[in-house]
Amino acid sequence: MAKLALGHHREAADADCVRAVLAELILTFLFVFAGVGSAMATGRLAGGANSVAGLTAVALAHTLVVAVMISAGLHVSGGHINPAVTLGLAVTGRITLFRSALYVLAQLLGSALACFLLTFLAGGEPTPVHALASGVGAARGVAMEVVLTFSLLFAVSLLATSVRSMARKVMALGHRGEASEPDFLRGVLGELVLTFLFVFIGVGAAITAADDAGKTTTGGGGGDGELTAVALGQALVVAVIATAGFHISGGHVNPAVTLSLAVGGHITLFRSSLYILAQLLGSSAACVLLRWLTGGLAPPVHMLAHGVGLVQGVVTEIVFTFSLM
């Protein structure tokens, strides 16, 4: 386990540290400018930033700018652009506490400058206020922030670790002794956490879209927009989770994927059974937490569309699952 490193004030005079701190200031400035700017621009459009289309546009803008900023700053500062990421990496010994303090200071300065500039460019229009939604209490708000920040840190921590190739085996039953191996335990825990995050974000996007549609009274509804928002949210989170968890558990997050890999001999049947159990526990926990956080809103029911028969549904599932494999 990495040790907590205090660092030394002499780091501030190191050329690499100076470049890294400056990079964090610039990257955070650009991230906040683009992200908050997109929210301000979307707020002026029909429907505003609180509609499904508006939320999708803002989320997509944030996703793209985060990807660009992290890619640009990865080899300079690590591309943190977030005090929570910096603190998390400092606690795990990835960077010193002294450097992390400089990073956080640079990030706060960069974000403040971005908001000041946006307000000036928008003719005095204030930047959006991030506050609890109507009917959401402080406890739920804090719980949501904990889950989302944990999701971010979990992905960053895994992606920061060098990728290790997974062992390939012929189909094997495995044995109970596997359960005591550290790599095995990490794999099972990884599947539980990754599946929890996948379901929490994916189903959460569907709940948000359904709730927004229920509040729409104009009849236009924007069903296609809601489907696009949900599909985009799930696609992005699958990409992140599969990449982040690849070298820990393989990033299955799906019993069908686990079963196919077991049949193909890539993992033992014993390991696959515990993976599936972890996935079911993770998905169930995510839905229970979502129901509490949303004040009792039920997760969407996945069922056959109107006019679609059982055979058509089964064939569609086979084709989609085959495509996934």
Image: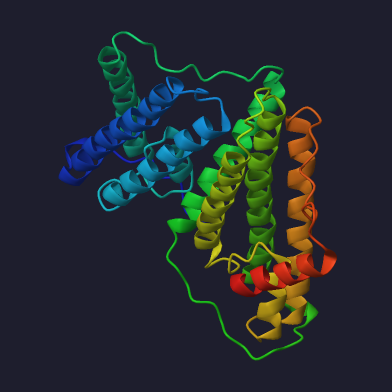
Look at 75% across and 39% down and name the residue there. Answer: 289
Look at 71% across and 68% down and name the residue there. Answer: 316
Residue 155, visible in the rendered structure: yes
The single residue placed furthest to the top in the displayed view is: 124
In this view of the protein, which residue sits in the foreground, 121 or 173? 121
In this picture, is 135 found above or below 168? above
In this picture, is 27 found above or below 108? below
The single residue placed furthest to the right in the displayed view is: 310
In this view of the protein, which residue sits in the foreground, 135 or 111? 135
Look at 39% across and 31% down and name the residue there. Answer: 35
> Residue 147, image x and y in percent?
63, 39
Specify the quadrant that holds the C terminus: bottom right
Residue 52 left/right relative to 211: left
Residue 325, visible in the rendered structure: no
Image quadrant assignment for residue 132: top right
> Residue 1, image x and y in percent?
52, 57
Residue 173 left/right relative to 184: right
In this picture, is 207 found above or below 190? above
> Residue 324, image x and y in percent?
60, 70
In this picture, is 314 found above or below 175? above
> Residue 146, image x and y in percent?
61, 35
